[in-house]
């Protein structure tokens, strides 16, 4: 028995499902989750001493690779001054200035502790600001686990085979409307039906919780127009895409301005951080300036801010995102070449440093329905063939992959070689 398997058995005795977040349990791929001990750069080491090239990167935050010296040193220095004060600190001001500088659509920003808190608070603010109740989201998009957002959501819910969670009162879910991602007609239809009660549309501008689906041309622009028409708040949930797909995040990459943006993952450098922000006029409704309540004991935590700022300082460097994007493209070209060589039907998708691999005959995947039609059994086999050979992909066909700046050419070549071997096995 491996030490991972041993620890998993132990974990299951006192932790529900043996994990602190469902997708970690490997339900989507079968087998026993790997317990990690340490990581450096693009390599993660499990408790049995095996090394993996890591394409999960803590589900996105580790864009600089693990154990980055600038982040580590910033955290150590911050810890020396105390862990938390529950009172304002200078470093929160610096963080707010930095975020607003990177993202011009954000004039004011509030720090929180997770992506879930960010989206939950943004929705409340949108409702408080507009005085309307309904929120429109997209099937297969995941925005964290707040009640009103766990309706037809992606990510771990999909590997559990449940589109929505029990425990959410029907009258709460009734205020959540779901449309099809990349289908503006479905959005228009719903908005027409509820024309005077749409508070907001929330979208992952690149869907990353149903594998990886970039927006089709005109989709985000269309959402902007529809929100303007219905006086609804447009929320880009950039918890995953923020600073990953472009220096200016997805809104910079696709040149569409939301009213509110939610952030997380990368801006915490690996620490628990989230944020939401946007137009002054909307943010003015937030307590203590306005009546919409939102708070947090550890919000703006100085150690987390130090880690996040150290990460952002690296991302600011010239050419960072161009290099990350090129590395990701190189990986996908290699995957496609191997797929062609071994006769495995595969489609790929990319937005900056995030990517998707789909087992499908289709040349391109643009809808949630198409994702659901992909060959899930083949993905499971593929995942384990890669895992055995030291490549750690997300343990679910419904998650995007993440490349870090530390995935250099030899590491990408090694990955492509492993994926080629996996395809050869699948072709047998
Ligand atoms: N929004 C998006 C787009 C996400 O991908 C996630 C998490 O993966 C969340 C929100 C929730 O963030 P957290 O897990 O930090 O609560």
Image (cartoon, rainbow, N blue to C red):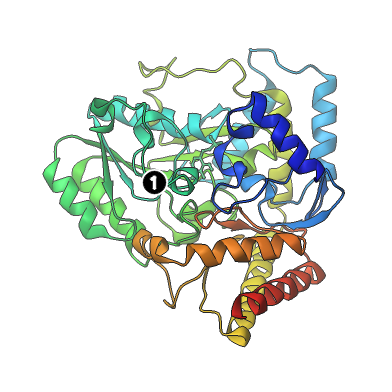
Q: Quadrant of residue 122?
A: top left
In the rendered image, residue 216, in percent from the top left (x then y), is placed at 37, 66
In the rendered image, residue 334, in percent from the top left (x then y), is placed at 66, 77
At horizontal 47% and vertical 67% (from top left) the residue drawn is 375
Query: In this rendering, would 16 be left or right of 405?
Result: left
Q: Which residue is at the front of the view, 282 or 1?
A: 1
At horizontal 39% and vertical 46% (from top left) the residue drawn is 258
In the rendered image, residue 253, in percent from the top left (x then y), is placed at 50, 60
Query: In this rendering, would 95 be left or right of 219?
Result: right
- SS under mark 1: loop
At horizontal 37% and vertical 17% (from top left) the residue drawn is 290
User: In this figure, which residue is indicated by the disc labeled 1?
Assistant: 258
At horizontal 66% and vertical 60% (from top left) the residue drawn is 384
Quick check: 86 above or below 170? above
On the question of residue 135 being in view, the answer is yes
On the question of residue 319 being in view, the answer is no
Quick check: 324 above or below 242? below
Mark 1 Cα shell of 10 Å, populated few (<14), some (14-19), many (≥20): many
């Amino acid at each position: 028995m491996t030490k991972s398997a041993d620890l998993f058995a132990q974990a299951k005795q006192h932790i529900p499902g043996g994990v602190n977040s469902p997708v970690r349990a490997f339900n989507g791929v079968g087998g026993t989750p790997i317990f990690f001990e340490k990581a450096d750069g693009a390599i993660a080491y499990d408790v049995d001493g095996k090394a993996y090239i890591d394409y999960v990167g803590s589900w996105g935050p580790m864009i600089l690779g693990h154990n980055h010296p600038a982040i580590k040193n910033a955290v150590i220095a911050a810890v020396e001054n105390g862990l938390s004060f529950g009172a304002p600190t200078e470093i929160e001001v610096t963080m707010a200035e930095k975020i607003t500088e990177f993202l011009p659509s954000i004039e004011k920003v509030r720090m929180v502790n997770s992506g879930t808190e960010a989206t939950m608070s943004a929705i409340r603010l949108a409702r408080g600001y507009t005085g309307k109740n309904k929120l429109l989201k997209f099937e297969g998009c995941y925005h964290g686990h707040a009640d009103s957002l766990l309706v037809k959501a992606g990510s771990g819910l999909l590997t559990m085979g449940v589109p929505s969670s029990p425990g959410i009162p029907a009258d709460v879910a009734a205020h959540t409307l779901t449309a099809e991602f990349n289908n503006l007609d479905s959005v228009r239809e719903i908005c027409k039906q509820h024309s005077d009660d749409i508070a907001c549309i929330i979208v992952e501008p690149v869907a990353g919780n149903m594998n990886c689906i970039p927006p089709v041309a005109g989709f985000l622009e269309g959402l902007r127009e529809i929100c303007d028409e219905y006086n609804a708040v447009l929320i880009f949930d950039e918890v995953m895409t923020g600073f990953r797909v472009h220096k200016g995040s997805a809104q910079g990459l696709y040149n569409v301005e939301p009213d509110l943006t939610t952030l997380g993952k990368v801006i915490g450098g690996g620490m628990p951080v989230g944020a939401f922000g946007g137009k002054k006029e909307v943010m003015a409704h937030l307590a203590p300036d306005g009546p919409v309540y939102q708070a947090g004991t550890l919000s703006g935590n100085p150690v987390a801010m130090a880690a996040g700022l150290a990460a952002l300082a690296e991302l600011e460097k010239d050419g960072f995102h161009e290099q990350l994007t090129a590395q990701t493209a190189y990986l996908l070209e290699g995957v496609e070449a191997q797929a062609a060589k071994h006769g495995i039907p595969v489609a790929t998708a990319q937005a900056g440093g995030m990517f998707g691999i789909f087992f499908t005959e289709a040349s391109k995947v643009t809808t949630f329905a198409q994702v659901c039609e992909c060959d899930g059994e083949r993905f499971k086999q593929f995942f384990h063939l890669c895992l055995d050979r030291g490549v750690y992909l997300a343990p679910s066909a419904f998650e995007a992959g993440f490349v870090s700046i530390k995935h250099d050419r030899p590491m990408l070549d090694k990955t492509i070689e492993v994926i080629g071997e996996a395809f050869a096995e699948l072709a047998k």
